[in-house]
Amino acid sequence: MWMFFHGWRRKMGCVTLVIACGVASAWGRSLIVRDTITFEFDGSGHYIVCTGGRIEWSTWWYADGHSPLAGMSWISGPEWTQPWMFVVSNSSPPLVASWTVPYWWLVLPCSMLSAYLILGKPRKWA
């Protein structure tokens, strides 16, 4: 059994398979639960949402330079299952950039790479 894992290819194949399984389980979770992370970094606010089989990362900042998370309040109540966020600001509207990646864009390449690394025949060195 240990001869199967001799060399780096099959070890890395197992690592990429574990990564693919982890991302696939997060994909399944995103179909049931909405996960949200909000943080500030380098003068801009970041909002990461995992829901509906995709990951969306939004970044926003203000042209006048004030902190993007200043004035934010979290509200929640018994009728909501997730906390909701709103911005109270009298300054300029925020500039927003957003990226969306479906989970399968991450799962499929990791799965294919792990299959290649695990099932591929190792080279014979002369």
Image (cartoon, grey):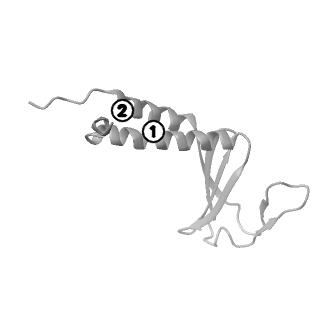
Residue 57's spot in the image, x, y percent?
A: 60, 51
In the rendered view of the protein, which quadrant contains the N terminus? top left
The residue wearing badge 1 is: 17
Residue displayed at 79% across by 59% down: 84
- Is residue 24 placed above or below 83 in the rendered structure? above
Within the image, what quadrant is residue 72 found in? bottom right
* Label 2: which secondary element: helix
Residue sitting nearer the eye, 26 or 41 = 26
- Circle 1 Cα neighbour tier, 10 Å, few/some/many (<14 / 14–19 / ≥20): many
Is residue 82 in view?
Answer: yes
The disc label shown at residue 121, or none = none
The residue wearing badge 2 is: 118
Is 34 on the left-hand or right-hand side of 3? right
User: Which numbered disc flags the more N-terminal residue, 1 or 2?
Assistant: 1
Residue type at mark 2: give it. Ile
Within the image, what quadrant is residue 82 found in? bottom right
Residue type at mark 1: give it. Leu
Residue sitting nearer the eye, 16 or 96 = 16
Residue 107's spot in the image, x, y percent?
A: 52, 36
Circles 1, 2 touching at the beta carbon (< 8 Å): yes
Residue 90's spot in the image, x, y percent?
A: 77, 69
Within the image, what quadrant is residue 8 found in? top left
